[in-house]
Amino acid sequence: MIALDTYITFCLAALALAAVPGPTVTVVIANALRFGVRAGMLNVAGTLLAGLMWLSIAALGLTAAIHMMGVWFDVLRYAGAAYLVWLGYRLLTSKGELATGNAAAVRQGHGLFWQGFIVTATNPKILVLFGMLIPPFLSKTGDPGYETLLLGGSFVTIAFLTDTAYAFMAGMAGEWLSRSRVRAVEIASGTFLAAAGVWMALKGS
């Protein structure tokens, strides 16, 4: 059984990792700024589902899963990289017109949900992260499957809470943004997304 102090240490480490903005957080912030809190939360819901999917894979066996995926591990990485670049391109070429797209975003909520899911699901780095972060905190006498679910589930929960905080902060800030400021945010977010996609692709080469 995992000791309480070990569990608390893990949660603090998970919080530190989840709070650092990455591709998922960038997508949540970009949509919350453009369309409001609800849009950001739809992204967060999608990322939560993807996180649970990766957690299930991790519980089946971290190292075994990576070897079993073989070439598909790289296919997922490159697919995720291409999707991030495409999202970045969409933002860079929107010309600020997304500032008035709130109603459309609400009607197409399922699209925002799956957007968040795809960004997280096509990022095998999460599985690798589980493989690096969880094993050091497993006890020598406990059930590794149960403990992996406990720690991994805690990480997914913490990431969900930090993503939610980002969505609310960005959504509330978005209400005060003018069209020109939204355009500036779109350029910055689009650049970061495209750069993250390129970085993921190059890292896998």
Image: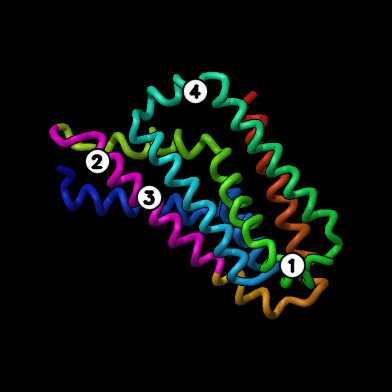
**Marks 4/3: CA distance?**
23 Å
Location of residue 202 in the rendering, given as x and y in whole percent from the top left corner: 67, 30
In this rendering, the answer to whether 122 lies above or below 103 is: above
Q: Which residue is mark 1?
A: 104
**Marks 1/3: CA distance?**
33 Å
Q: Which residues are magenta?
A: 141-167
Query: Which residue is painted at 27% across and 51% down in the image?
Result: 9
Dot 3 alpha-carbon crowd within 10 angstroms: few under 14, some 14 to 19, many 20 or more: many
**Marks 4/2: CA distance?**
23 Å
Query: Which residue is painted at 49% across and 64% down in the image?
Result: 164
Residue nearest the viewer, comparing 193 with 44: 44
Q: In the figure, residue 147 lies in which quadrant?
A: top left
Q: Which mark is residue 147?
A: 2
Q: Which residue is mark 4?
A: 69
Query: Which residue is painted at 52% across and 35% down in the image?
Result: 124
Q: Amino acid at mark 4?
A: Met
Q: Secondary structure at mark 4?
A: helix
**Marks 1/2: CA distance?**
43 Å
Q: Which mark is residue 115?
A: none
Q: Secondary structure at mark 3?
A: helix
Of the two numbered discs 1 and 2 on the same chain, state the one appearing first in sequence: 1
